[in-house]
Amino acid sequence: MGTPASLAYFLARGDVALFERIENRRAGGSLRGQKEVFMIELVLVRHAQPDWEPMGRAVDHPALTAWGRRQADAAANRLVGDYDAFYVSPLERARETAAPIAERLGRDPQVLSWLAELRLPTLEGRTPDEVQDHFRRTRARDLEQWWEPMPGGESFRHMYERVSAGVESLLSEGHGMRIRQNSGYRVWHPEKRDARILIVAHNGTNSVIVSHLLGVEPVPWAWSRFSSPWTGITRLCTAPAADGFIWQLHGFGRVDHLVGLDPDQDPEAG
């Protein structure tokens, strides 16, 4: 993995601790003085702003708005770097967000079906008021019912299991990590190499990944507990713990790349 060497790079991302860990490893040291430290970094990106009602009526699989395309382009500039793997959800809004990133990186992402957002009942062709009424009724249910689907949709219980199993399979089968028990807790054992993994997906998908890897209690409102803005960048890294590694949150939903951009300004004007 080609890890950026500049302290300024990490300062811009609020990752001084991560910079210190990398420099410690390069010097041949160990944070615990017991074993060599190998770091897995997982970079999660939420898609840019989607155009849910392009003609005043809802669509189930929207493309991006003009502002969303500018968000994606700005995120792509921020995400330039070396990655061992690049993955994307199959849904259009995520793939369109990933397109400028792929252009900057000079590589296409691999599409993973389990990265898709929670599948809702079809709302195609409904008015904005009808859509709002649907979500009002959905959220008015008792919290325990939030695990269950609205008629025609996917249950959040199934989605949570789908994404949790997907990320575990990706890390173990795709990147050589293993899970073991230590005093009743799950610890990870990566291969003896660094890895940097980039994923472009959705608010719900990314929130489940964060919850699962951090060992946070599953709840049917995980998408609200770990909600990030459009093109928000979230970073998880492994850290040594006992005889293995745990996951640490090194940045959540960061949108520094949007600072200074005016959503109402036409980039072609002038």
Image: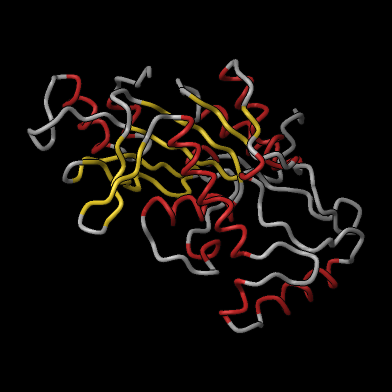
Color style of the picture:
secondary structure
In front of the other: 44 or 188: 188
Q: Residue at x 86, y 51 (%)?
A: 54
In front of the other: 151 or 178: 178
Left or right: where 55 falls relative to 245: right
Q: Position of residue 166 (x, y in %)?
A: 54, 44
In front of the other: 49 or 209: 209
Q: Residue at x 50, y 30 (%)?
A: 78
Rendered view: 227 above or below 81 = below
Q: Position of residue 203 (x, y in %)?
A: 58, 53
Rendered view: 102 above or below 147 = above
Q: Position of residue 63 (x, y in %)?
A: 78, 42
Rendered view: 103 above or below 122 = above
Rendered view: 26 above or below 126 = above
Q: Residue at x 56, y 34 (%)?
A: 75
In front of the other: 169 or 65: 169
Q: Position of residue 201 (x, y in %)?
A: 60, 43
Q: Residue at x 31, y 38 (%)?
A: 15
Which corner quadrant holds the N terminus?
top left
